[in-house]
Image (cartoon, helix red, strand yellow):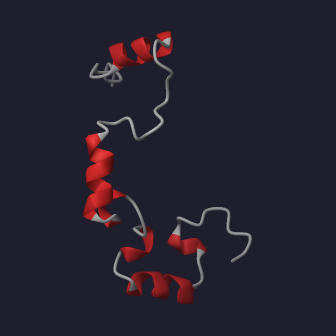
């Protein structure tokens, strides 16, 4: 379906397409990523200690401090 508004929903896909994806046994959604890299590349990235990813904040950004304060906090449960 070319005009599929929600491609993640299998009900919106053609039966042949769903059969093709199912026959791949979950491999359809895992084409790349860290686990698929060779061990030398993984070791290189791991040795950078998180600096390989761009991150969301620039060093010294006050928003980073605020986000860090929120980390690990528990939201109040909605009242019943």
Residue 69 in the image, given as x and y percentages of width and height? 34, 13
Q: Residue at x 32, y 22 (%)?
A: 71
Position of the N terminus, as image quadrant, is bottom right
In the image, taking residue 76 as reference, residue 9 lies left or right, namely right
Q: Residue at x 39, y 59 (%)?
A: 33
Residue 19 in the image, given as x and y percentages of width and height? 47, 87
From this view, report whether residue 13 is shown above or below residue 78. below
As drawn, which residue projects farthest toward the right?
Answer: 3
* Depth order, front residue of 17/40: 40
* Depth order, front residue of 12/67: 67
Residue 73 in the image, given as x and y percentages of width and height? 29, 19
* Depth order, front residue of 54/2: 54
From this view, report whether residue 51 is shown above or below residue 28. above
Q: Quadrant of residue 15?
A: bottom right
Q: Residue at x 55, y 84 (%)?
A: 17
Residue 66 in the image, given as x and y percentages of width and height? 42, 12
From this view, report whether residue 38 is shown above or below residue 49. below
> How many callouts does the rendering have?
0
In the image, taking residue 18 as reference, residue 46 lies left or right, namely left
* Depth order, front residue of 71/45: 45
Position of the C terminus, as image quadrant, is top left
């Amino acid at each position: 379906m070319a005009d599929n508004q929600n491609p993640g929903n299998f009900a919106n896909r053609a039966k042949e397409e769903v059969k093709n994806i199912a026959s791949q046994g979950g491999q359809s959604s895992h084409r790349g990523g860290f686990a698929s890299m060779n061990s030398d590349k993984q070791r290189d990235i791991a040795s950078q200690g998180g600096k390989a990813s761009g991150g969301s904040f620039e060093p010294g950004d006050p928003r980073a401090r605020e986000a860090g304060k929120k980390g690990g906090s528990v939201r109040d449960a909605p009242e019943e």
